[in-house]
Amino acid sequence: MFLGNALGGLHSCDYTPTYIDNINSITLQNSIVDNLFATKNTEIDITKSLDKTWDFNTILNAEFNNNLLAGNINFRSSQCSSLRIKHREKGTNTWVNLFEIPISKAEDLITERFDRFCKGNKTEYEIAVVPVINGIESNYNMNSIVSDFDGIVLSEMNETFLTPLDVKVTRQRNRPSSVLNTLDGKFPIVVINSQNNYDSGTASGVFIQLDENTCAFDVENGWKYRDSFLDFLSDGKPKFLKIDTGHCWIVSIVDNISEDNSQHRLKVSTNFSWVSIGDITNSQDLYENGLVSVDSSGW
């Protein structure tokens, strides 16, 4: 039998293109590879030279130019005007816009941001990084996190104070109303003239800075941390208040702030009152209270 030019085509031994979900890794070994290209497009013609231009089906394209880069960072930087970072509690549909990062070059895509506005008590969140092209959102690149902490946390946009020590928080729901007693009826009439429906309360805790290297509280210098915390509480700016039970609010600190060292001179409890002033799941409430820098009013 004479076969002639058997399997002589460039892609004769390639696998038939198939679509497989949930591929998490690819291993190359014992080989010399010039290019590794993966796509979700199963209709490509493998008898021709592959078009490796990035599109929404492309998964990776490693050209091994003295590096292991396989992503589309150069493509994305030329196509998107900004990156939008947002989160939502898993199981809900309400996205909260946290950051808008302008993109003018590839290096701008290498960034780090801290999400200070997640509930505690092991609440699961979905985080999305979204390329924005001329104001229009592209594909959502999503991941999940679990938020958990001990004690109480108060945050502004770029500053946070927290403590797990002797935390006490009270809450009451405010729904103003008036009771009118009638002359000829057994029961009164309740009049609600306002849409007010908000929480308020008090909070206290022993605020001492934790040394991240030794994981020990700096008790002797605790007064310095508390002085900074007092300035933070009294700066007149809205705060994001959250406790480890999962409760959280956008709040203003009201009335006087006090300290109590009756148990020990180094065990000083800071006490303050708060009133909720916004919805934590409303992006515009967070923006108007100065907690995030993304103005969502025009979206």
Image: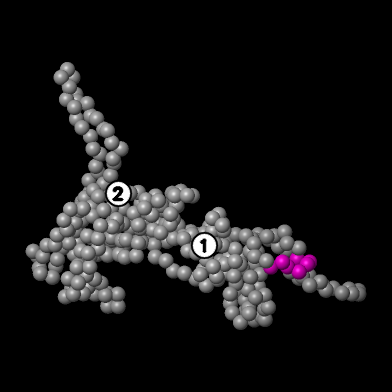
Q: Residue at x 35, y 49 (%)?
A: 279
Disc 1 secondary structure class: strand
Q: Residue 68 magenta-drawn?
A: no
Judged by its main secondary structure, the magenta piece is: loop
Amino acid type, residue under disc 1 in the picture: Ser
Question: Residue under circle 1?
Answer: 82
Residue 169 visible to the viewer: no
**Is 290 left or right of 224, judged from the image as shown?**
right
**Is 166 left or right of 2, judged from the image as shown?**
left
Classed neighbour count for the residue bearing mark 1: other residues with Cα under 10 Å, few (<14), some (14–19), many (≥20): many
Estimate the spatial distance between the alpha carbons at disc 2 and disc 1, rounded to whole Å: 30 Å
Which sits in the foreground, 18 or 200? 200
Which sits in the foreground, 239 or 246? 239
Amino acid type, residue under disc 2 in the picture: Ile
Disc 2 secondary structure class: strand
Residue 209: % across, % down: 24, 71
Residue 172: % across, % down: 22, 46
Count of marks overlaid on the render: 2
Task: Answer with the quarter of the image where residue 21 lies.
Answer: bottom right
Is residue 93 placed above or below 18 in the rendered structure? Answer: above
Question: Residue under circle 2?
Answer: 277
| Magenta residues, start to end | 46-52
Task: Answer with the quarter of the image where residue 229 lies.
Answer: bottom left
Which sits in the foreground, 122 or 98? 98
Q: Residue at x 25, y 63 (%)?
A: 232
Is residue 76 placed above or below 67 in the rendered structure? Answer: above
Q: Residue furthest left?
A: 262
Residue 215: % across, % down: 27, 74
**Protein image colouring:** one colour
